[in-house]
Image: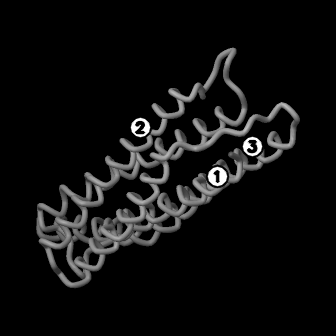
Amino acid sequence: MEENKKVIDIVALDKKAAYAKSAKPLLYVGMGSMSMAFAGLISAAIVTMGEPTWIRTDIPDAFTTSSIVILISSITMWFTQYSATKDNQQGIRIGIIATFLLGVAFIYSQVVGYGQLFDDGVVFAGSVSYAAGSYIYVLSGLHIAHLVGGLVVSIVVMIRAFMNLYSSKVMLGIELCSIFWHFLGGLWLLLYFVLIYLS
């Protein structure tokens, strides 16, 4: 019986070790795929911009607000990871909750931005739509979809944080969440300046 338990423990440890080794590379591959998808859309927008039918559209003020919000969320995410390195359980919980709430605030400000676009007559599709406006919706909307994934991951980290499962020696989940969150923040800032260029 003890032999079987030892074997099971060894298998479990091997699985954890394998996950720890593969998790980051898999995340980087995923982020690389996302980057290529956005690069394709940005390239298509720039090419379309050269056509005589291109109508410039001002980006909504709410997008500037959301840019500030996501910058602050990167700071709180950094604080979460820093707290883990110091075995600061309360800091981990405060940091990840703040990051999650700022993520929700980012999405809210984006939705407000869509309302501003709509009020200005900029719609995604239809007889009165045009390319510049559609690209604003597509690029920002696709980013929101990925950010929702980041929020789901942050919820998992939050739950585990309240179970005191993280420490300076066990923080892979926080590291993965942090890498992805900073990636999303950097991606949005790139998109923000691209949208300014296109407008």
Q: Quadrant of the C terminus?
A: top right
Q: Quadrant of the N terminus?
A: bottom left
Q: Amino acid at mark 1?
A: Ile
Mark 3: secondary structure: helix
Q: Position of residue 168 (x, y in %)?
A: 24, 81
* Residue linked to disc 3: 45
Q: CA distance from mark 3 to mark 1?
A: 12 Å
Q: Earlier in the sequence, mark 1 or mark 2?
A: 2
**Residue under the point 52% across and 67% down:** 25
**Residue under the point 66% across and 54% down:** 194
15 to 197, vertically: above or below:
below
Circle nearer the viewer, 3 or 2 = 2
Q: Quadrant of residue 57?
A: top right
Q: Return the mark for residue 112.
A: 2
Q: Tell which of 69 and 80 is nearer to you.
A: 69
Q: Amino acid at mark 3?
A: Ala
Q: Give the class, few, some or many, for how many residues have Cα within 10 Å of label 1's Cα (few <14, many ≥20).
A: few
Q: Earlier in the sequence, mark 3 or mark 2?
A: 3
Label 1 near label 3: C-beta < 8 Å? no
- Left or right: where does residue 155 sit relative to residue 134? left
Q: Position of residue 91 (x, y in %)?
A: 17, 73
Q: Amino acid at mark 2?
A: Val
* Residue linked to disc 1: 196
Q: Give the class, few, some or many, for how many residues have Cα within 10 Å of label 3's Cα (few <14, many ≥20).
A: many
**Residue under the point 14% across and 73% down:** 89
Labels in figure, total: 3
169 to 175, vertically: above or below:
below
Mark 2: secondary structure: helix
Q: Tell which of 16 and 26 is nearer to you.
A: 26
- Left or right: where does residue 35 sit relative to residue 99? right
